[in-house]
Amino acid sequence: MLERALVGPKKYWTGLVGLLVLIGIGAGCYFLQYQKGLTITGMGRDVSWGFYIAQFTFLVGVAASAVMLVLPYYLHHYKAFGKITILGEFLAVAAVSMCLMFILADLGRPMRMLNVLLYPTPGSVLFWDMTVLNGYLFLNIVIGWVVLAAERKGVAPPAFVKPLIYISIPWAVSIHTVTAFLYCGLPGRGYWLTAILAARFLSSAFAAGPSLLIILCLLVRRWTKFDPGKEPIQTLGTIVTYAIIMNVFFLLLEVFTVFYSRIPEHMLHFKYLFVGLHGHGIYVPWMWAAVILCVVAIALLLTRKARANEKILLAGAICVFLGTWIDKGMGMIAGGFTPSPLEHVTEYVPSAPELLITLGVWATGFLILTILYKVAISIKEELAS
Amino acid sequence: MSLNRRDFLKIAGITALGVGAASAFEVLSGKQLEAALKAAPLTAGKRWAMVVDIRKLREEDYHDVVTACHTSHNVPDFSGTKDEIKWIWAEPFENAFPDSPNEYVKPEVKDKPFLVFCNQCGDAPCVRVCPTKATFKGPDGITMMDMHRCIGCRYCMAACPYGARSFNFRDPRTYFADKEVPNREFPTRTRGVVEKCNFCTERLAKGLYPACVEACKSNALIFGDLDDPNSEVRRVLRANFSIRRKPQLGTDPSIFYIV
């Protein structure tokens, strides 16, 4: 099956080379980081996690969102998703791969990574995060590959894959829940110390992931002979609409609790992000941009009639993706660390090499995605002809 | 005579064979070790604690204390940068106790910096979150670090509600490249690991008080065993009203402040 990734039109190879260039630049910057240490990033004593961990958090959500295809298709026999479930699963594979790379990029001593296995510590949420992420990667590779291979041969998938599919449904929820637990179980960080964090994470994930899938489906239709079909894309649009509304609702619940109770430990972080604190407010325009993007997205996607227009659907999906990315990929981590537990405001801005490493990891993820999608779509094209 | 690692292991192996593995372990068995250490009073603590008497602290103490700690532990001076490493430092009252805002607090407190450092929590969040047990609790209540096991994930820094932890963003040894390492008996760290106040566990093992306590000429730092009702810290805590940083978080800090 993999040999299908080795043949393709010029556009395919140009894309791969482009991604490889970005990966090369990222790898070069990572080499620099490996030599000099994390001093080359914008992270410091007060904001000790930054862009890497933020991307990781966002991408866990993208990975988890594959369940939005798997669940309706396998549990409710919603046939329209049969055509694109593989796209969701392979997106999950690419997203989890990026998550693991971002964790690795963030480690001070990456060579000791396996200490997490050598000295397993079930009391640490990070131990569980490693467990669920690797498990989810394994599940999606196996399920996606085996089901695709069966489809190619025109036979039913082997029986062993069914239980794996059912396990993968709660597993998807678990990866983002555990990722939220990384943050919301810490006593001194008021921005994260809220039971709704996991729910917020999941709702934004189920908005961001399917909106990326909509974008990908439309690209696939444009660039290949495989048409994911109108109905599944529309259903994804409905899912995105519900999820983004829920995400904004959850955020408002948090805003009410924080600002009506007026407990500074929780309120100061919101103030820092949305209006600035002690004269520092580098994230203010970004956070408001995220709010506007989410509101615009809801306005665009709210009615079925508007969503039926694929141009509007695409615009809405892009707004959702960018809005949730700013919220999680920028604000969530820096905002949690600012102000510090001693109420100092240290602003975090990622450095150029840090951004290039980030870009390199995203490019690696998209390389994995491109190759997996090439295999899947080639098979779909062969079957159709 | 200098031994390389290989020779050392060889000799150690032969010795162990000669003595017999069982007896080699007996020599180091917990009870005997404890009994041996009890001979020195400072090595017998069940829960080490410190009282910082802010009333007694004088201007020059801050410098003395911080310098004593940082030279004793070979802490590189990257102050003023984001990569700063500090084990003990001074903070204004409002930053040391951000949960106790009080505009009208007496000037002696408001204008006096507080010495802050690792709280050696009874229930330490950093120990709870560490994925490799590189941060762990010693039998004497000290929150310890294994610099050789730490993977540098910095989860402990996110978990610490006191900002007590520093990460070696840079190679700390570059700082000592052109100068003498202040304390040859204490290891320097490598880049990529987290560090913090260790309550001078290496000095306690020798029966010495922590470097900060020794350096504080005004005797404003009182060190002792919280588990021993007759210890100096317990006596001082009985006689004075004391506060701790963020006790509402349930971390049970072992550092007390008298204001």
Image (cartoon, coloured by chain):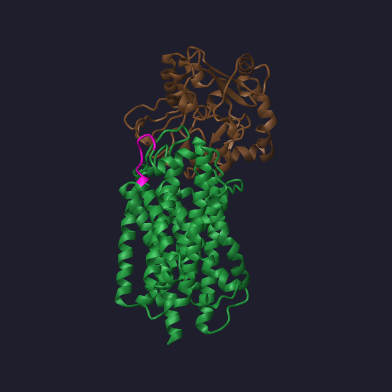
Chain colours: A green, B brown
Q: Position of residue A322 (x, y in %)?
A: 39, 58
Between B129 and A292, the residue placed more toward the observer is A292
- Do we see residue A93 in this rendering? no
Left or right of B93 in this view: B79: left
Placement of A292 over or under B60, stated as above or below: below
Placement of B1 over or under A52, stated as above or below: above
Between A326 and A256, the residue placed more toward the observer is A256
Quarter assignment of residue B123 = top right
The mark tally for this picture is 0
Tell me the residue at 64%/16% (across/down).
Answer: B238
Residue range of the region highlighted in magenta in the rendering: A277-284
Q: Position of residue A218 (x, y in %)?
A: 39, 72
Q: Is residue A82 magenta?
A: no
Between B94 and B136, the residue placed more toward the observer is B94
Q: Position of residue B232 (x, y in %)?
A: 62, 16
Q: Is residue A281 magenta?
A: yes
Q: Position of residue B69 (x, y in %)?
A: 46, 24
Tell me the residue at 59%/24% (across/down).
Answer: B49
Magenta stretch secondary structure, dominant: loop
Quarter of the figure with the C terminus of chain A = bottom left
> Can you name the residue that lies furthest to the bottom here?
A385
- Do we see residue A244 in this rendering? yes
